[in-house]
Image: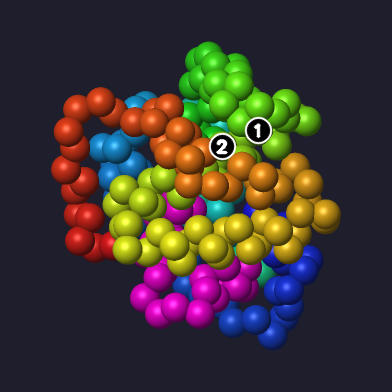
Amino acid sequence: MWNGLFFGLVSLFTPQASLPDTATMRDEIQQFAQVYEIDTDRIHVRESTMNNPSPFLTNSGIKACVVHVNQHADAKRVWSHFLDSGHDGMEPAFLAFTSAHELTHCLMSEKGKRVESRKALEAYLGVQFKSNVHFEETLADLVGLAYVSKVVPEAFEVVYKRVKAIRTDFSNRDPEHNSTQALNEQAIHFAGQMFSKTESIKVANASKH
């Protein structure tokens, strides 16, 4: 998502929005884990300053998954542009989406998850993804939106329209991150059910969203 934003509309004149600290991200991980099956022991959060326009970067492997919160000035500009939905008070909802998006990458590095999930999503959508990157980015968008619909449903439409607009705007420049064909409510629901816990869940601290 992030590279296309930076090389498209984001410039040196874009304001720098504050990124969450590591404690906030850890809270997001724990909340996500109440909704979806994920091994949180593998996940670590680090604050970094990388020469990269991505506000969040995830390095995932079998043993561990590290989510970096990138405090670089360019990353803050990209985050600011993403938040610019025209609606006030939406930052927690966008953070929920982004956290779920990144944590889906962590999920895919758990043993067997990527192969099984790709087969299931391709069968449901009736498509064949060009690469694992295209598959994961599409799935991450779908799970991110499904998560928003569960923890902050009143903001779903705003986040959904913003994500779809960004993916549409940069689809030619960044085709591996183009999830637009899959971004519909039925596919979002399907992706959310792929990892959802079966028991009745009360989302902790949902009021903060």
Q: Quadrant of residue 10?
A: bottom right
Numbered tag placed on residue 139 in the rendering: 2
- Please state the horizontal and vertical placement of residue 86, each as a whole percent of the image: 50, 80
Q: Tell me: residue 19, above or below residue 133.
A: below
Q: Tell me: residue 60, above or below residue 146.
A: above
Which residue is drawn at the image coordinates 52% and 43% (left, top)? 142
Which segment did they paint magenta?
76-102
Secondary structure under the numbered disc 1 in the rendered image: helix
Going by the image, does 169 lie left or right of 83? right
How far is disc 1 from disc 2 in space, using C-alphas? 6 Å
Q: Tell me: residue 151, above or below residue 187.
A: below
130 or 187: nearer the eye?
187
16 or 190: nearer the eye?
190
* Residue 2 visible in image: no
Which residue is drawn at the image coordinates 42% and 45% (left, top)? 146
Label 2 Cα crowd, 10 Å radius (few <14 / some 14-19 / many 20+) = many
Q: Quadrant of residue 127?
A: top right
Going by the image, does 201 lie left or right of 117? left
78 or 64: nearer the eye?
78
- Please state the horizontal and vertical placement of residue 110, each as a whole percent of the image: 49, 21
Which residue is drawn at the image coordinates 19% and 27% (left, top)? 199
Callouts 1 and 2 close, C-beta under 8 Å:
yes
Q: Is residue 95 magenta?
A: yes
- Please state the horizontal and vertical placement of residue 201, each as a whole percent of the image: 19, 37
Q: Which residue is mark 1?
A: 135
**Which kind of residue does numbered mark 2 sit on?**
Leu
**Which kind of residue does numbered mark 1 sit on?**
Phe
Which residue is drawn at the image coordinates 31% and 48% (left, top)? 150
Chief secondary structure of the magenta portion: helix
- Count how many numbered circles sit on residues in the image: 2
Q: Quadrant of the C terminus?
A: bottom left
